[in-house]
């Protein structure tokens, strides 16, 4: 087929990892990944041709939990530009969310088709391992960089939680995902032992892939028993089942058009096309009719695959966002993919074993896709990125085969309006538990959180009072799901509801 000069393609990808703690800043790591992407493209004068640099927001700029006193760049794209010898016209700093890397690809493919950009570098990184090592050892590092160049800072982005959720103990992604995971266990009707056995097999398969990846933060592989026997964080999750953010990792992609690739001498063997894409935002967890999954994730995956003209059986390379096990099974359950370790569902090894570099993980997934897919140009790849708490979703289907899709006209966005949602009740008297989590502190059960529904179908989230260890222990010794609770509003804190089991 004749390929139009304005057809967008990925022409380079690079990754960087520093396994040992050192002094490199997040932007220093991102710059190394960017240079690796430029080198991998095989073109001439590529850095000089870059007109846009877009950077995924780092965790220390996203939330107080990851804040640093080591200094920061006031213009992350310019930090990278300076390091690689680029002089872009446009500098973009993203919103938060693990969906950002795939969403960037969708956005910039449309821009490239329409001629608004000609060569885009997207990059991201984390140096949380270096940051924590400096604090632990009282090291003085200076990561401050000041630039005068203009920056399009897109801010925080959409919130993924409501006041009632946040005021009842759901202050970390861990607790949201535990409630999603528990709802899935209830839906499948499995005992806790059998359910954890399934999760162990799934995650052991991810760890095996990570062990073979030279860009993994953590060497070696883990068995299912080692994963499940690690320090408990909730009644379902151990420390080795969730995303590990203490990493020094970066990844970058080069996006351009066929015409520009020809001009720069980038070989056709490095051209990767996108054949399908979609993205959308889920409703708050406590309002989802089925809290065990995400209907938006399902629709996003379906639309991307359908647009490509393929089905999931035609796709040999798969990377599903894996911050927690249910993030993977939300996709595998819907697409009827085996989640027992018999089929590779990650190209990197996943966030618990490869590493969880903040909002930028899926940049690594796409970079791995670019590196692997060119060895067999006939194959197709599926990437699913997830942000928030199964909240922000973006999928892409890729191949070395030319794509005829006009990305300037392609309808890739799915409106939240298509989703059903439950009504939340602010001051419930009681209800029935539909999912829950028991959260641990330093290996000891500390707090219970329940997602409940009233008799007339309204939802609420409630937590145990700080002094109520009796209810916490009841949650561990007697199945909470299906039980009735009574609720008492906290006298001093708005939106806070404390529950006890009725009867």
Image (tube, grey):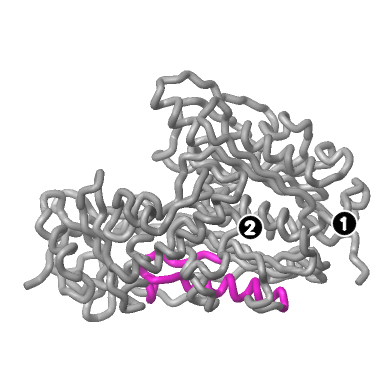
- What segment is highlighted magenta in the picture? 280-309
Query: Is residue 301 found inside the magenta-colored segment of the image?
Result: yes
**The N terminus sits in image quarter:** bottom right
What residue is disc 1 on? Answer: 268
Looking at the image, is mark 1 or mark 2 earlier in the sequence? 2
Q: CA distance from mark 1 to mark 2?
A: 22 Å
Which label is found at residue 102? 2
Q: Is residue 169 magenta?
A: no
Residue 209 position within the rendered picture, expressed as x and y whole percent measured from the top left: 56, 56
Please say whether residue 348 is visible from this viewpoint.
yes
164, 251: nearer the viewer: 251
- Residue 335 placement, left or right of 204: right
Nearest to the observer: residue 364 or residue 360? 364
Helix or strand or loop: what does disc 2 sit on? helix
> Residue 321: horizontal and vertical position, in percent?
53, 59
Say if 27 sits above or below 180 in the image. Answer: above
């Amino acid at each position: 087929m004749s390929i139009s000069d304005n057809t967008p393609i990925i022409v380079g990808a690079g990754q960087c990892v520093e396994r040992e703690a050192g002094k490199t800043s997040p932007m220093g790591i991102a710059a190394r990944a960017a240079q690796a992407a430029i080198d991998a493209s095989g073109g001439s004068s590529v850095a000089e041709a870059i007109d846009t640099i877009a950077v995924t927001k780092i965790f220390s700029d996203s939330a107080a939990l990851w804040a640093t006193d080591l200094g920061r760049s006031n213009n992350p794209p310019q930090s990278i530009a300076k390091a690689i010898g680029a002089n872009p016209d446009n500098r973009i700093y993203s919103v938060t969310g693990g969906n950002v890397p795939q969403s960037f690809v969708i956005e910039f493919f449309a821009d490239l088709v329409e001629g608004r950009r000609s060569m885009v570098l997207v990059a991201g990184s984390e140096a949380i391992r270096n940051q924590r090592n400096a604090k632990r050892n009282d090291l003085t590092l200076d990561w401050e960089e000041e630039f005068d160049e203009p920056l399009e800072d897109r801010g925080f982005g959409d919130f993924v939680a409501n006041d009632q959720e946040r005021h009842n103990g759901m202050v970390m992604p861990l607790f949201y995902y535990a409630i999603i995971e528990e709802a899935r266990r209830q839906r499948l009707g499995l005992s806790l032992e059998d359910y954890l056995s399934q999760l162990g097999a799934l995650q052991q398969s991810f760890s095996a892939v990570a062990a073979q990846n030279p860009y993994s933060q953590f060497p070696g592989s883990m068995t299912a028993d080692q994963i499940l026997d690690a320090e408990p964080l909730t009644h379902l999750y151990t420390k080795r089942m969730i995303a590990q953010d203490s990493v020094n990792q970066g990844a970058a992609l080069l996006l351009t058009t066929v015409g520009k690739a020809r001009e720069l001498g980038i070989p056709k063997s490095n051209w990767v096309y996108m054949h399908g894409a979609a993205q959308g935002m889920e409703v708050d967890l406590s309002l989802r009719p089925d809290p065990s999954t995400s209907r938006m994730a399902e629709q996003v995956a379906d639309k991307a695959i359908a647009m490509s003209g393929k089905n999931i059986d035609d796709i040999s390379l798969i990377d599903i966002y894996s911050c927690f096990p249910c993030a993977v099974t939300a996709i595998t359950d819907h697409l009827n993919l085996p989640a027992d370790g018999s089929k590779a569902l990650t190209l990197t090894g996943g966030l618990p074993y490869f590493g969880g570099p903040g909002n930028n993980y899926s940049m690594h997934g796409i970079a791995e896709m670019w590196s692997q897919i060119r060895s067999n140009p006939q194959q197709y790849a599926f990437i699913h990125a997830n942000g928030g708490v199964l909240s922000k979703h973006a999928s892409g289907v890729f191949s070395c085969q030319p794509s005829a899709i006009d990305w300037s006209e392609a309808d890739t966005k799915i409106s939240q309006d298509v989703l059903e949602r439950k009504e939340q009740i602010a001051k419930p008297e009681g209800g029935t538990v539909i999912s829950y989590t028991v959260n641990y502190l330093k290996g000891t059960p500390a707090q219970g959180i329940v997602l409940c529904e009233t008799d007339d179908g309204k939802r609420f989230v409630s937590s145990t009072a700080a002094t109520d260890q009796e209810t916490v222990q009841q949650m561990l010794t007697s199945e909470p799901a299906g039980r009735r609770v009574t609720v008492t509003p906290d006298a001093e804190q708005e939106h806070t509801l404390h529950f006890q089991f009725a009867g």
